[in-house]
Image (spheres, rainbow, N blue to C red):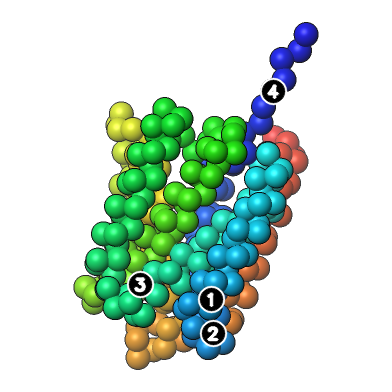
């Protein structure tokens, strides 16, 4: 009798994953700004629209019980957009500031990871087989994306480092994590979550660099044009991932 092979519901963490994630998180930054500011919907309305969108996409994703690139990355991009809007709402509407907002979000993420670890005995992000584990996965991702936005804005705005300098600093930290991954015995799961949070502000600061005016240290491409550009980049990356096995066989 053959034993049924249960497929994981999430992608492997390879270089392509990080490329698509950065494109998605950058789109999350420019997309949230486009809806909340350019289209004048405000943060609360943007949060409501994309939280509902996220929940609907998550329902579809959970029902599949397997990894499907399009469903996965649409759900992920929704967390990136709503995460940006929540971060800005905490800072600008509630007036709590990015530093306090980041502290609250770090605490929330720690609580979710604690209960996830307590339930599953692991925080592996490559082996997700049950609906409950995938719920923890997406809740953690939503909080981590929100935290990444707040941390990036804290560096660029509160510390007045600027967008380009912030992106450069985060890139150096990410390269350091990459070296730790390959040349030390530090927990790979710990390094993943650290990198996951950092790639969010890396994408966000890069998005801000493109959209903000010259007076604010940006290149003034606007939110609509920047969002369209990164949506196209994300689409191309998804097409590549969907056909990854075929491309890999062809190259061999």
Label 1 packing within 10 angstroms: few (<14), some (14-19), many (20+) = many
CA–CA distance between discs 4 and 2? 46 Å
**Mark identifier at residue 90:** 3
Task: Describe the element under mark 3 as helix, strand or loop.
Answer: helix
Do the residues bearing badges 1 and 2 touch, measured as CB atoms within 8 Å? yes
Residue on which the image places disc 1: 46
Of mark 4 and mark 2, the one earlier in the sequence is: 4
User: Do residues under tags 4 and 3 come within 8 Å of each other at their CB atoms?
Assistant: no
> SS of the residue at dot 4?
loop
Q: How many neighbours does mark 2 have within 10 angstroms: few (below 14), some (14-19), or many (20 or more)?
A: some
Q: From the image, which quarter does the C terminus lie in?
A: top right
Looking at this view, name the residue that lies furthest to the bottom: 215
- Residue in the picture at 38% in, 32% down: 118
For marks 1 and 2, the one nearer the N-term is 2
Image position, residue 75 (x, y; %)? 61, 56
Q: Residue at x 55, y 65 (%)?
A: 51
Q: CA distance from mark 1 to mark 2?
A: 6 Å
Q: Is residue 113 left or right of residue 11?
A: left
Point out the frontmost of discs 4 and 2: 2
- Image vertical order of residue 7 relative to residue 200, above or below: above
**Marks 2,3: beta carbons within 8 A:** no
Q: Which quadrant of the view contains residue 128?
A: top right
Q: Identify the residue at image location x=36%, y=50%.
A: 109
* Residue carrying label 2: 41
- The mark that comes first in sequence, 2 or 3, is 2
How far, Cα to Cα, is label 2 from label 3? 16 Å
Q: Residues within 10 Å of mark 3 (few under 14, many from 20)?
A: some
Task: Classify 22 as above or below 207.
Answer: above
């Amino acid at each position: 009798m053959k034993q049924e092979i249960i497929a994981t519901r999430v992608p492997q963490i390879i270089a392509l994953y990080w490329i698509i994630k950065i494109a998605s998180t950058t789109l999350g930054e420019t997309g949230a700004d486009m809806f909340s500011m350019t289209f004048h919907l405000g943060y609360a309305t943007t949060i409501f629209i994309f939280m509902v969108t996220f929940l609907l996409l998550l329902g579809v994703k959970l029902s599949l019980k397997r990894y499907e690139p399009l469903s996965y990355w649409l759900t992920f991009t929704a967390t990136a957009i709503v995460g940006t809007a929540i971060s800005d709402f905490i800072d600008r509407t509630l007036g709590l500031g990015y530093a306090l907002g980041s502290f609250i979000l770090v605490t929330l993420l720690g609580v979710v990871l604690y209960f996830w670890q307590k339930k599953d005995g692991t925080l592996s992000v490559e082996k997700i087989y049950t609906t409950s584990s995938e719920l923890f996965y997406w809740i953690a991702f939503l909080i981590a994306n929100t935290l990444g936005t707040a941390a990036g804005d804290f560096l660029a705005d509160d510390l007045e480092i600027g967008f380009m300098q912030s992106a450069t600093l985060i890139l150096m930290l990410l390269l350091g994590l990459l070296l730790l991954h390959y040349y030390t015995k530090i927990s790979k799961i710990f390094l993943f979550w650290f990198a996951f949070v950092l790639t969010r502000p890396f994408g966000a600061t890069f998005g801000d660099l493109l959209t903000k005016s010259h007076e604010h240290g940006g290149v003034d491409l606007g939110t609509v044009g920047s969002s369209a550009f990164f949506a196209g980049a994300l689409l191309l990356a998804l097409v590549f991932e969907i056909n990854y096995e075929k491309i890999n066989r062809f190259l061999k």
